[in-house]
């Protein structure tokens, strides 16, 4: 899985995995994803609770043998209070109703976020890669852009609109998505 | 340096109702699930990961001295205890071995003497609400409803110069892993199980059946088996020395057993009623009821013992006073508390179908006991 930084906390007992994560998150750029490798099973519940308290996004964890791989994304300041600018906006429910139509659902979150749950059939292009990958998106279809809170997708929608796409921003986004999810 | 406090010291404080202030630094979910409880215990929860930058934010919630910090295993409580001491709190301690150690600690409490000079002890597992027993008579001992940790029984028997020769479980447990087989391996004792609970077990055992008399010591202290189904189909009680009634998970001091942990509540509710409202009624009111669990600290007496006369329970235990059969059925099959942590896996372990590592066994048992209808 593509991540921005990796922290090795294997073999460390509580509280060290969190102490180290805290430090690593301070140095991490907003929006980036940190992978934490740990062997202390207590880290599962603690990292999730800690992330929530800190306003970070705990994406999930995977296991391979004795090693736990946690994924935490550092939120950007603007994210929790999105400033909407793109004018074509639809709700989660609107999008759910149109999923059977011939449309493109574009998920602009980080690959790790996408991996831990996305709308079936959604195309993954992280916001940071949109400029270089925009050409891969079909211009003849309506594009519904989604992220976690409607903030990154708003920026993406504006970019795509400039390039001539018929694009809609989906709000509030994946954090409140109640429809089907694929992992 | 903060002092390491052993689970044993905390158990004594809880039983003796000594004041104890606890700062529990586990995450909120674990704290909500279970914690150290007692009449004289005050406990607050602030996760350790909210205290990484210091403890200033919680100083107004703490006394100036004698704070016990607890966490899951130990490490985080040591860190927070250090921070508290730096912030000027005196008499700071942390729970040695964390809540794991608390969950596993057994406090032996003497129940009473027996007619031939033998003794009966109750092992109170405060952290989990489990009660187990040791009958000692003339150099021999019998352990009933043993916990997974067998060392305390071995040590105690040795201290009493007794050899463990009999081991029994009143039923196939769903809330804790039985130490029965391990005790047999260690001591060569006979291991008794009710055959109706043991249809799927993967090991040899002695069939514990109604009317069996299991003798401990050379004299006539017998554990007399009384078939008493309801919590499980095989549940069997013991009458020891015509004085004590070991009820397993059928009857507790403040509540009664639940019939649903083997997935057959509807089938067993009739048996449960029959046992509680007929079979036990035929027994002497003077028998001292000794259950395999307690759910509330109010069931623990001043000396740490959990017991009550059978006649008394027929007056005060609400589970024994539901006249209407339909209402009784409803009470024990609807609105039951959540099932114990990992209860299905625990049953498999007790049948010998699963053999997890020690650490996994520990994980399975973590959390509160929930064998009662309350």
Image (tube, helix red, strand yellow):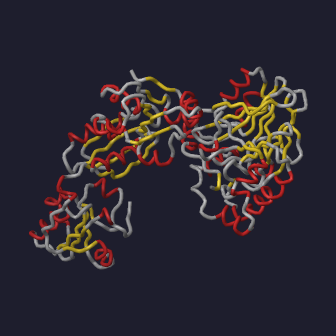
Give coordinates of residue A40: x percent, y percent.
43, 37
Q: In this view, does B325 lie to the left or right of B254?
A: right
Q: Is residue B157 above or below residue A169?
A: above
- Which quadrant of the structure image shows residue B233? bottom right
Measuring 74% from the left and 47% from the top, which residue is drawn there?
B171
Q: In this view, does B222 lie to the left or right of B322?
A: right
Give coordinates of residue A149: x percent, y percent.
24, 62
Q: Nearer the viewer, residue B143 or A92?
A: B143
Count numbered badges in the picture. Answer: 0
Q: Is residue A95 left or right of residue A62?
A: left
Q: Nearer the viewer, residue B349 or B137?
A: B137
Give coordinates of residue A55: x percent, y percent.
27, 50
Q: Nearer the viewer, residue A47 or B226?
A: B226
Q: Which of A159 and A177 is in front in this view?
A: A177
Q: In this view, does B36 lie above or below A153?
A: above
- Extreme residue in the left direction: A162
Measuring 45% from the left and 36% from the top, which residue is drawn there?
B22
- Which quadrant of the structure image shows residue A87? bottom left
Give coordinates of residue B85: x percent, y percent.
34, 26
Quarter holding the C terminus of chain A? bottom left
């Amino acid at each position: 899985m593509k991540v921005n930084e990796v922290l090795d906390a294997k073999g460390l007992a509580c509280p060290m995995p969190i102490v180290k994560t805290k430090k690593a998150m301070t140095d991490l750029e907003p929006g980036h994803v940190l992978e934490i490798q740990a062997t202390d099973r207590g880290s599962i519940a603690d990292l999730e609770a800690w992330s929530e308290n800190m306003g970070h996004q705990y994406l999930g964890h995977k296991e391979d043998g004795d090693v736990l791989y946690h994924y935490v994304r550092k939120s950007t300041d603007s994210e929790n209070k999105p400033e909407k600018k793109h004018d074509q906006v639809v709700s989660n429910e609107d999008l759910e109703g149109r999923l059977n139509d011939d449309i493109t659902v574009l998920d602009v979150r980080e690959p790790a976020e996408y991996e831990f749950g996305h709308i079936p059939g959604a195309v993954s292009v992280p916001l940071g890669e949109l400029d270089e990958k925009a050409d891969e998106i079909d211009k003849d279809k309506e594009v519904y852009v989604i992220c976690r809170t409607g903030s990154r997708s708003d920026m993406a929608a504006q970019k795509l609109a400039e390039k001539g796409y018929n694009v809609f921003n989906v709000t509030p986004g994946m954090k409140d998505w109640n429809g089907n999810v694929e992992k | 340096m903060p002092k390491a406090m052993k689970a044993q010291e905390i158990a004594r404080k809880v039983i003796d109702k000594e004041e104890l202030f606890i700062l529990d630094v586990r995450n909120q979910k674990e704290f909500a699930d279970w914690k150290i409880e007692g009449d004289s215990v005050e406990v607050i929860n602030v996760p350790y990961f909210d205290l990484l930058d210091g403890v200033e934010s919680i100083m107004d919630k703490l006394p100036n001295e004698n704070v016990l910090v607890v966490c899951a295993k130990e490490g985080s409580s040591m860190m927070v205890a250090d921070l508290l001491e730096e912030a000027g709190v005196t008499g700071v301690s942390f729970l040695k071995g964390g809540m794991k150690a608390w969950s596993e600690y057994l406090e032996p409490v003497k129940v009473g003497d027996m007619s031939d000079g033998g003794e009966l002890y109750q092992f109170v597992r405060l952290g989990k609400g489990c009660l187990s027993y040791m009958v000692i008579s003339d150099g021999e001992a019998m352990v009933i409803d043993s916990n997974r940790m067998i060392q305390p029984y071995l040590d105690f028997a040795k201290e009493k110069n007794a050899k463990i020769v009999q081991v029994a479980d009143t039923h196939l447990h769903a809330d804790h892993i039985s130490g029965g087989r391990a005790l047999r391996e260690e001591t060569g004792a006979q291991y008794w199980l009710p055959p109706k609970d043991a249809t799927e077990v993967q090991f040899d055992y002695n069939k514990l059946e109604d009317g069996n008399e299991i003798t401990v010591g050379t004299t006539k202290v017998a554990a007399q088996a009384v078939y008493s189904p309801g919590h499980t189909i095989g549940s069997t009680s013991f009458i020891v020395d015509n004085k004590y009634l070991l009820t397993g998970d059928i009857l507790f001091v403040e509540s009664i057993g639940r019939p649903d942990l083997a997935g057959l509540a509807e089938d067993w509710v009739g048996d449960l009623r029959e046992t509680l409202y007929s079979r036990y009624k035929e027994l002497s009111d003077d028998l001292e009821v000794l259950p395999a669990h307690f759910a509330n600290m109010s069931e623990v007496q001043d000396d740490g013992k959990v017991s009550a006369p059978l006649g008394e329970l027929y007056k005060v235990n609400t589970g024994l006073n539901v006249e209407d059969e339909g209402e009784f059925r409803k009470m024990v099959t609807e609105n039951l508390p959540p099932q114990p942590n990992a209860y299905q896996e625990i049953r498999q372990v007790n049948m010998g179908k699963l053999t997890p590592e020690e650490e996994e066994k520990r994980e399975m048992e973590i959390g509160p006991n929930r064998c009662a209808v309350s």
